[in-house]
Amino acid sequence: MSVEIVAKPNGPYVVSGDLSLLELRDGTGKLYDLEGKKRVFLCRCGASTTKPFCDGQHTKIGFQAAEEAVASEV
């Protein structure tokens, strides 16, 4: 099974699938332990106190995200 990342409307990135294929690291290169997890929620509003993970702050600050991917020109 692959890893899927979905940007939730005005919410976090939901990362699901075979997370054993994923290496999530902090800014210093330290690896986050995702063992046993089937999905994680990553902050995209910038207000979470548990970065890189979402703690629901997006609902408190009224985060408004772009709802669609921007088409790239090749």
Image (cartoon, rainbow, N blue to C red):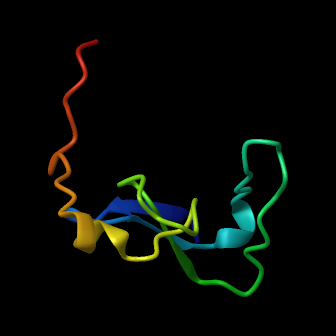
Residue at 35% over, 71% down: 57
In the picture as drawn, the residue positioned furthest to the bottom comes out as 36
The spot of residue 68 in percent (x, y) is 16, 46
Q: Is residue 18 above or below residue 52?
A: below
The spot of residue 47 in percent (x, y) is 41, 59
Image-based side of 46 in relation to 72, left or right: right
Give the image quarter of residue 28. Answer: top right
Q: Quadrant of the N terminus?
A: bottom right
Q: Is residue 69 above or below residue 39?
A: above
Residue at 25% over, 22% down: 72
Image-based side of 70 in relation to 53, left or right: left
Residue at 28% over, 12% down: 74
Give the image quarter of residue 43. Answer: bottom left
The tally of labels here is 0
In the picture as drawn, the residue positioned furthest to the top comes out as 74
The spot of residue 63 in percent (x, y) is 22, 58
Residue at 25% over, 72% down: 60
Q: Is residue 24 above or below residue 60?
A: above
Image-based side of 28 in relation to 21, left or right: right
Q: Which is nearer the eye, 66 or 51?
A: 51
